[in-house]
Each structure stands twice: as C-alpha cells, then as structure tokens.
Amino acid sequence: MAYQLIDGKAIAREVRIEVKRRANEFFINTGVKPKLAVILAGDNPASQVYVASKKKACGWVGMESASYEFPSSVSEKEIIDTIYALNEDKSVNGILVQLPLPKHISEENVLRAVSKDKDVDGFHPMNAGELMRKGANLEPCTPAGCIYLLKKAGALLSGANAVVIGRSNIVGKPVAMMLLRENCTVTICHSKTKNLKDYLQNADIVVSAMGRARAITGDMLKKGAYVIDVGINRMEDGTIAGDVDFESAKEVAGAITPVPGGVGPMTIAMLMNNTMIAAEKQYG
C-alpha cells in the first residue's frame, strides 16, 4: 500500500507565506509591525534553540521579536513583573513563555499572568476554557498544527475514530477537544491504558504525544490510518526519533508525518499565525 508523506516543512511554509502577506498588509494599514516577545529563563540548550528558531521565523514573516532572557536563579516575581509590563506594552502583540521553567517557578502562576489576548501559546486558563466550549481565538500551536496537517492531507474527520496518545495540557487534551469539534469520536490513551494496540487498530486518526521512541509499530495500526507523530525523542546517537516506528508504520498507514520535518515546523508556523491573529484583534 502506497502511503502519503505529510510534509510538515512544505505545509508550514504555505502558512508562513500567508502570514507574511497579512503582516505586510498590517504594516501598510497601521505603520507598525506585529511583535512577539519571548521569555526564556535558564540555560536549557533545547529551549535556546527553540527561541532562536522562533525569532528567525518572526524575521522571515516580517514581524519584530524581542527576547527577555533570565538566569536559572531568576525569581518568579521578576518573571511575572516582566509579563505584566509586556501586557501593558501596546507595541507587543504576543507573549510566549518558553517552557520548561526552572523548577522553583510555578508554570501555572506564570502562564496565568499572560494576558489572554496576547497568549499566543494558547495556554491561559481562559483560552483553554474557550477552546473546550466553542473554540478560542488563540489555540495551542502544536494541536492546531496537527489538525491543519490532517486537513491538508485530506483526512475525513467527521465521523472518524480518533485516538490521541497522551493527556498533557499542551498537546493531548487540546488536540482531543479540536478533534471533537471536527466531529470525530475521540479516545484518549495514556500511560495507564491497557492494550493500546486494541484501540489503535480501530483508529482512523492517530495523534501520538506519548514521548516514547518508536513505541508504535505498524502492526498496531489500522490499515489506511492517518498518523500524526508529535513525539520528539533524542536517541543515544544524537538523532531524533518520533513515537512511531516510521519504517514499519509507513507500510500500513494511509498518511504519516515524519520526525523531524512533520509537526515541528507546523508548531512554529501556527505561532506566527497566532501572533498575527493577536495583532489584528488588538488593532481592530
């Protein structure tokens, strides 16, 4: 069976091109560029790479970016005070707090401090609540990217059986809500789920964010399933692997994302889109 490779890089580029068009139009109409502020605490190498890629993406689409970097010893109050100042700064349209934060800082308190209208990660409790009720203006970037990829790949979502593996607030729960909104029948599996294969073999749609390298193999999947692999697992040899064993899964799946080059580029593209949405809303 020939599978369809869901090329996240190419699809993300399409999104960025459209955001670039809107950013240029926004500049013509307002005389200002949309602006994203990124807060980074600590010296986590992966976080530093992610922040650099987000700043680069801002430049590509014609947005401004500013980073506020703190040492690991930073106090929770100092970060929250910075966020409050950015909330009031009319030149800033979006605020992103790079996770994880140092262990002595409450992520919950910090994320609550971000204005819901500048919460381009979609993590604020009010945005999370609106997502569950009717759909938020600013939705979490990775889940939104997953749904976008499925639609671009031609998945028939209405009436489909969807299995989400993982129940985090960042990916699992919100992507399940979005799939419900698309009229899927959704099952959430997690670390305590027994007989995962039984669920997967009835799944038309699979979204995995379990964080276990190559744990999902082709024999576990339903023939023709659409597989979105959110997993990013660093192997001993330094390479990156997804949750899905790509080589065996591609023999069964109807469509599948690669790792890397699948969901990752979409996350940043949807962040650019959210920053654009926030700017447009703030300027009416």
Image (spheres, helix red, strand yellow):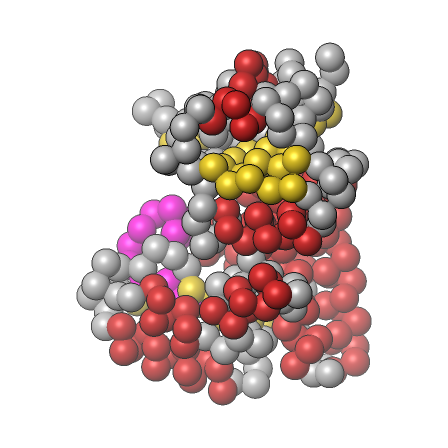
**Which residue shows up at 54% across the image and 28% down it?**
199
Q: Position of residue 40 (x, y in %)?
A: 37, 62
**Which residue shows up at 42% across the image and 64% down it?**
97
Residues 8 and 157: in front is 157
**Which residue shows up at 42% across the image and 84% down it?**
85
Above or below, comparing residue 84 to residue 251 in the picture: below
Check if residue 22 falls in the magenta segment.
Answer: no
Quarter where residue 132 is shown: bottom right
Above or below, comparing residue 85 to residue 106 in the picture: below
Residue 109 shown left or right of residue 123 in the figure: left
**Which residue shows up at 45% across the image and 46% down it?**
167
Q: Position of residue 60 (x, y in %)?
A: 65, 57
Check if residue 42 falls in the magenta segment.
Answer: yes
Q: Quadrant of the C terminus?
A: bottom right
Residues 95 and 157: in front is 157
Magenta-drawn segment: 37-49
Residues 160 and 259: in front is 160
Above or below, comparing residue 226 to residue 36 in the picture: above
Q: Position of residue 270 (x, y in %)?
A: 63, 55
Q: Is residue 63 visible?
A: no
